[in-house]
Amino acid sequence: MGKIIVLMDPEQRKAYLQEQLNIDGINPVKENPQGAYAPIALTSAPKKIRKYLQSRQDILINDVLLPLGIIAHDPAKDKLSPYENPHIPHTDVHRGDTLKILQNRYFVGHNILPSTGVGDELEKAARYNRMAVILMDKNIRISTMLPHRIIYLQYDDFSEQKKEIADVIMVLQQFDPGMGLEDDVPVLLGFEKQNGSGIINLEKTIYQEFPHLRYDVDGNKDIVQFSVKNPQIFSEYKKEKNAGQLDLFS
């Protein structure tokens, strides 16, 4: 068993987060210990599967988190959503979503598309030391560029396994988050709430208690394939069309 090096305990976390807020020009934010930011791919999600993504999001928010007393923020239903307001400045979206992540201790959502659609949010979850759990569909291959200090789980059928995911969150609710290293690898630490003395590697603990849910990369699985329906927005396409060089069968 590797040796855990504590880089940041709950008290140090408060000072660390304040420093990060100062760097980002954000006023002090109150964190809800029973709140969650539930990331979901929006702009990059093909219309044909948006209803599937939203269905899994609704199950997560209403059937997994809410019964545990965790109130989740759904970016798809926020005024900053590209569905609600496609003309909102990117600076407003970035700052608004950052604030929502900071206001909620948990960060729990699905990662299904090959280009996640929530990559920046994932990095912020790690940087701001959220209790982060990302859920993968076992039958779908995704990008393997994934940050440290996040718990990655997989499922076969989310609606059938929601109770198992809830059990994972219940374990996390027994701890306050922190940061550390184990064998020089960045890890998400848990500091036991009851007596304050227990310190664990939360990622390793969850993977050991729920081995069948641990995400494993499988390069043989299919990715979700996108279909480009409007190549004419590319300047190269227009040039090839004008020059009569388009390959109509590619």
Image (cartoon, rainbow, N blue to C red):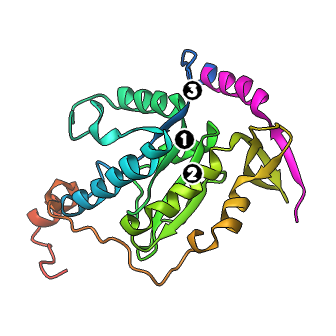
Locate residue 158, reporting x and y percent: 40, 65
Label placed on residue 203: none
Q: Which residue is mark 1?
A: 106
For this rendering, which residue is in front, 66 or 27?
Answer: 66
3 or 2: tag closer to the N-terminus: 3
- The kind of secondary structure element at disc 2 is helix
Locate residue 109, reporting x and y percent: 45, 52
Query: How far apart are the alpha carbons under marks 3 and 2?
Result: 18 Å
Locate residue 58, reporting x and y percent: 32, 50
Q: Mark 2: give few (<14), some (14-19) or many (20+) Cα within 10 Å.
A: many
Q: Which residue is mark 2?
A: 169
2 or 1: tag closer to the N-terminus: 1
The amino acid type of the residue labelled 3 equals Glu
Q: Circles 2 and 1: CB distance less than 8 Å?
A: yes
Q: Mark 3: give few (<14), some (14-19) or many (20+) Cα within 10 Å.
A: some
Q: Is residue 20 magenta?
A: yes
The amino acid type of the residue labelled 2 equals Ile
- The kind of secondary structure element at disc 3 is loop
> Residue at point 78% right, 28% down?
12
Q: Which residue is mark 3?
A: 31
Magenta stretch bounds: 1-21
The amino acid type of the residue labelled 1 equals Tyr
Q: Is residue 168 magenta?
A: no
Where is residue 209, by image quadrant? bottom right
